[in-house]
Image: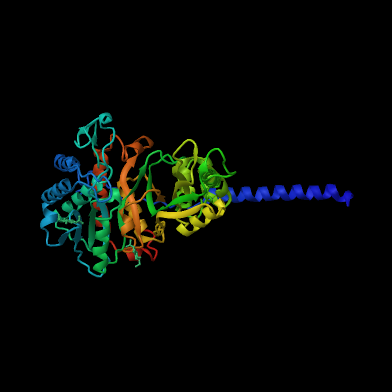
Amino acid sequence: MWANLPRILTLVVRGFVLTLAVLTAVVVIRTVTFPSYQTSPPECKTTDPDFIPADEERLARFTSAIQFQTVSYERGVGTPQELAKFVRFIQKSFPTVHSSPMVRRDVVGNYSLLYRVEGSDASLQPYMLASHLDVVPITEEANWEAPPFSGQLKDGYIYGRGTIDAKHSLMGSLEALEFLLSRRHQPKRTLYLAFGHDEETGGHFGAKVIGDVLTQRGEKIAFILDEGSPVGDGLAPGVSKLLALVSVAEKGFLQLRLEVNEEGGHASMPRSESAIGILSKAISKLEDNPHPNMFGTGPEARMMEYVATEMTLPYRILASNLWLFSPLVAWVYSRKPQTNAFARTTTALTRFNAGVKDNVISPEAVAVIDHRIHPMSSVEEVMEFDRKVINDPRVKLNVINNRPPSPTSPYGKDSPTYMMLQETIQQIYPDALVTPTFMVANTDTRHYLNLSSAIYRFNPYVMTPSDLPRFHGVNERISVQNYERVMNFYYHLIVNMDKPLELKRHGHEDEL
Ligand SMILES: *[C@@H]1O[C@H](CO)[C@@H](O)[C@H](O)[C@H]1NC(C)=O
Ligand SMILES: *[C@@H]1O[C@H](CO)[C@@H](O)[C@H](O)[C@H]1NC(C)=O
């Protein structure tokens, strides 16, 4: 047998080299032949006869919209007078929309707005564009470069709360509709505009009621577009072009209260374990054992594949060969909080309370864990995982609040609505790549889940990494150019919806 050893070793080495050669060949071939998922529809040009310019009048309307201080503070606590004034302003600002016999407007839940624009072909399912009237409160007012409710124009930017969240889409979609109706165009497909008034505090009195109204009408919606992820500029590694991120799902959440009750007593005669000690161990186990890395199971993997052919070399090899490199990419994702949030259900310890006196052993210890659930997982799975990891019946788990992750909307070439959205984005941003992703935050669409199986969350403006803190933060602003793109994006979307969506499913490749 020992005599055979050199031969066996030679065989093993040969086998290894051969495998490596085959793997390399497959990786190279896939990298070179990987399909492109991008399209190049006719570009929207400023010289088009139906281009909507951000002229003085439209900018003035947008500025005025920013000046209404429609702040939502907490659930049920908002600014009713400002909302009422804003609603009147909207009515006055878009006379064609508000006088057209094709348009029915309902005020829902006192302040939210639901418009129905009657299409000429009643056999087509309606679709819905959503946004919201309210904004988050102002922080660090002293650090703003322009007053937060001024809508001031400065160096090509409009400053103010709501410019990117989300009065841009509210005003932008109304401008598009006003423009369209003043040109006497009746859409083929019925269209809803839905504007909730308390999105920032959960939409319980706005979007919730809009959803109920539409459910009562028995309405089925072909697709819904709400605010969401932006066109990223430098937001993704390996991609030098603009990257339009279309969110096809939302993470869920689970807030858990962990509680331990043990005998208390005087600190002079402690038992070997205390409530605080037991709970601390449970929490440190949860932090040491993150929920499984799910990279590759949801839209986050497609996010790379859809732009693979456009990536710089090392990334291109990885993205075209996730069958092999998925574990490596998963590991890279897990290294930073910003990417880790896309790879797994996250665990955040948000509260820890115990003890009242220096010399008394606390009989009780309480902590709160905030999980954000990956779209491919579930509330039950997360609970089960935590129980197993803690593995101590003395730690009681109580659900404070939870929402399952949203279903994932269809995307890719098999989905005519996704492709229509992609095309529209690329008409406005001819140089941008479009890719699916999911949101780690929530939108009003949580109240619309039963109305449609195709729900997308997207903001048609560009954001750089340095713009991200402006969202809900200081110096929120939008460039005039971006606002112009927002208006034209909605206009093109409405016009594109006149084309037969369903037909595309049967492979009109040239049209895609
Ligand atoms: C609407 O307004 C009425 C009267 O001001 C009030 O009683 C009611 O609670 C309000 N409803 C909502 C949903 O805010
Ligand atoms: C959707 O329908 C289910 C079943 O009728 C219901 O339990 C759920 O609350 C509805 N969700 C929304 C967001 O309306």
- Left or right: residue 187 versus residue 303 is left
Residue 156 against residue 76 in the figure, above or below? above
Query: Quarter of the image holding residue 407?
Result: bottom left
Residue 58 percent location from the top left of the image: 16, 43
Q: Return the residue nearer the eye: 50 or 278.
A: 278
Residue 313 percent location from the top left of the image: 52, 41
- Left or right: residue 372 versus residue 492 is right
Residue 460 percent location from the top left of the image: 30, 46
Name the residue rendered at 34%, 59% in the picture: 417
Name the residue rendered at 39%, 66% in the picture: 506
- Left or right: residue 288 versus residue 96 is right
Residue 65 percent location from the top left of the image: 18, 43
Residue 304 visible from this viewpoint: no
Q: Quadrant of the C terminus?
A: bottom left
Q: Return the residue nearer the eye: 14 or 194.
A: 194
Query: Quarter of the image holding residue 59?
Result: top left
- Left or right: residue 10 versus residue 166 is right
Q: Return the residue nearer the eye: 150 or 246.
A: 150
Q: Quadrant of ligand 1?
A: bottom left
